[in-house]
Amino acid sequence: MNSKTQPYDVLVSMQNKITKEKHNHFRDMMVSSIYSQAEEIANNVVTKSNKKKIDWDKKLDDILTSRITGYPIMFLLLGLVFFITITGANVPSALLADFLFGIEAQLTTFFIKANAPAWLHGILILGMYRTLAWVISVMLPPMAIFFPCFTLLEDLGYLPRIAFNLDRLFKKAGAHGKQSLTMSMGFGCNAAGIIACRIIDSPRERLIAMLTNNFVPCNGRFPTLIAISSIFIGSAVASKYRSIAATFFVCILVLFGISITLLVSWGLSKTILKGVPSSFTLELPPYRRPQFGKIIYRSIIDRTIFVLGRAALVAAPAGLITWILANVFIGNQSILAHLAAILQPFGRLIGMDGFILIAFILGLPANEIVLPILIMSYMAKGSILELDSLNAMGNLFIENGWNWLTALNVMIFSLLHFPCATTLWTIKKECNSLKWTLFAAIMPTIIAIITCFIITQGARIIGLI
């Protein structure tokens, strides 16, 4: 008998005796036993000259990773980051928009003095430049706030605690605990979340994480969710509670998106991406004092500028196409209006209309331009524009047949539908597969359509609308 292989055979024999259900429990017990023995040996042989009277790391972990307090604290911190991002981004967004659209005015003056043809001014300035200015003014401030907040939590050592708390849920879904980290990155930008999937070693679990990252809203979709929630949910309460009600409903949507992430991960792991969840032994690092220089560099250079650059690359061509569709007429209607008429019956079936679907399709390059395209379509204007206030936007929507069911479906569809072009491009780069990139676009869209169909038909059957 080979003495070197005997222990291996014994372990294989033990593994075969352990049922699949008890495998994870056995693995956790084994790892815990190893760490307990290591700690015992260390305590016996290591002498600490300045032994702390209170182990603050352990005290904090008892609270932050507790089954009772861990999840509420995670939710509160998430809400706090959202609150800081949403409220903090308003002023710089407005200033940036004033600056960029001021340049647009100067460019328009230049085109007029140069006696340039109107179509050239329309394509370059009202189409490409205005779309680019809109994307930068809307995306840059939230990302410049969200990513430093997120990186601060990362530098403090809190993110591994999130992975520890959510590991159990993702394990039950057949996915990897680190997926919670990539999902968190998706709140800032899904493309960044896709890149973050590199931390998952298993190709199968990495692919699941990439395919489901889109179910958490990014900064590009937050403006749509917040605006519609403020108009139709916030208006249902007193004005002083309007922001709180709208923020609370957005948080509910985020939780719904996380639930869909777990559900789809479970479905993929049981069907086309079958496999055994890989082991995930996470040694919680000590809490650290944040290094603000590194935080600013990593969050601004490595994340914000990188993601914004990719978004800008796809936003400019999108503006050109949108301008052409809205300004080329066939008969008495623009091409945009004709396309909306074709999609109208299907849109009604899922509680929306043809113009809304066209806005989502044309918003493929960047989710930030969905609402401006929709407003432009309703107002029959030939360039992207913004209304002066949420009330004016709400009145425009109501005049075009919106009700609470339309608003709910638009928010649900915005949350679940296909990823933006930047994210799809990133998926293609990361997995190097056109097949999985197409799947990443089609799968969430089918889920969004089915969800909206069930909500709409259910509301109509029981007489809510």
Image (cartoon, grey):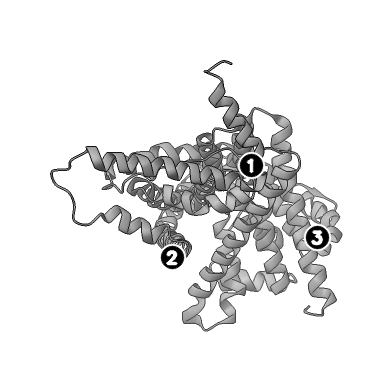
Labels 3, 1: front one = 1
Which residue is nearer to you in this view: 183 or 335? 183
Write the residue at 71% across / 62% down. 378
First along the sequence among labels 2 and 3: 2
Write the residue at 52% across / 34% down. 198
Quarter placement of the C terminus: bottom right
Kind of element beneath mark 3? helix
Three-letter residue code for mark 2? Thr
| Residue ID for mark 2 | 69
Write the residue at 40% across / 52% down. 145
Three-letter residue code for mark 3? Gly
| Residue 1, numbered circle | none
Three-letter residue code for mark 1? Ile
Residue 169 percent coordinates (x, y): 58, 53
| Residue 347, numbered circle | 3
Residue 77 percent coordinates (x, y): 42, 61
Image quadrant assignment for residue 455: bottom right
First along the sequence among labels 2 and 1: 1
Which residue is nearer to you in this view: 284 or 440? 284
Q: Is residue 111 visible?
A: no
